[in-house]
Image: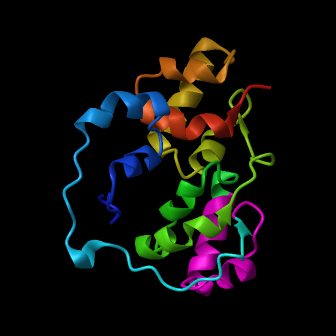
Amino acid sequence: REKGAKFFKKEDFKKIWGVTPKDYERLEPYVVIESLAFNDVPKPYNKNLELRINVNTATSEEFQKLKGIGQKTADRIVKFRNALGGFISVEQVGDTWGFQKETFYNLKPQFVITTENIKQINLNTTTVDELRSHPYFKWREAKTIIEYRTQNGEFKSVQDIRQIKIIDGVLFSKVEPYLAIE
């Protein structure tokens, strides 16, 4: 909600990055969505639903073919995708800085995703700067991971970073697909 998104129905809660189906099942009875005023509902517009864009392979020019995406937004989507190492979920596209939530909501059915070429970071060889360049890691977290590895030896699994206190469940669920042990 802080980024301008709105919940229109209970099922929208499932779309939050890091909320697993099990979490949703447990929390669903407590989710209450107040009815929205007429002007709060996103306005659908005519769109060519036949045009599908693979968000992990599309160029800036391909994104611009969609109604509501200009050059700056398209460039930002590609830049964010490259910084992440690829999108794991279509929902991540909506996290692109400057991408209007209403536009994302309307275009989301036209986005498809393939995740076979996600760039992963090897936890046993990465540097603070490499980790820090990933959008989900702040400098403090990147530095702490490297210090932990220096003090405790190589990681045996990606799950080992859960031993680090500042890596909470939400952050871990976001970064896990981007991490590897080689």
Using the image, determine if residue 19 lies above or below residue 88: above
Q: How is the image coloured?
A: rainbow
Image label count: 0
Image position, residue 34 (x, y; %): 19, 56
Residue closest to the eye, 5 or 144: 5
Majority SS type along the magenta span: helix
* Residue 28 counted in the magenta span: no
Using the image, determine if residue 157 lies above or below residue 37: above
Image position, residue 91 (x, y; %): 53, 55
Look at 49% across and 44% down and name the residue there. 139
On-image quarter of the C terminus: top right
On-image quarter of the N terminus: bottom left
Is 160 placed left or right of 114 in the picture?
left
Asked whether the viewer can see residue 167, the reply is no
Is 45 placed left or right of 182 in the picture?
left
Residue closest to the eye, 169 or 125: 169
Asked whether the viewer can see residue 43, the reply is yes
Look at 67% across and 69% down and name the residue there. 78
Look at 64% across and 69% down and name the residue there. 110
Look at 47% across and 22% down and name the residue there. 164
Is 158 placed left or right of 144 in the picture?
right
Q: Quadrant of residue 179?
A: top right
Image position, residue 113 (x, y; %): 70, 56
Is 2 placed left or right of 130 in the picture?
left
Using the image, determine if residue 159 lies above or below residue 103: above
The range drawn in magenta is: 55-82
Q: Quadrant of residue 58?
A: bottom right
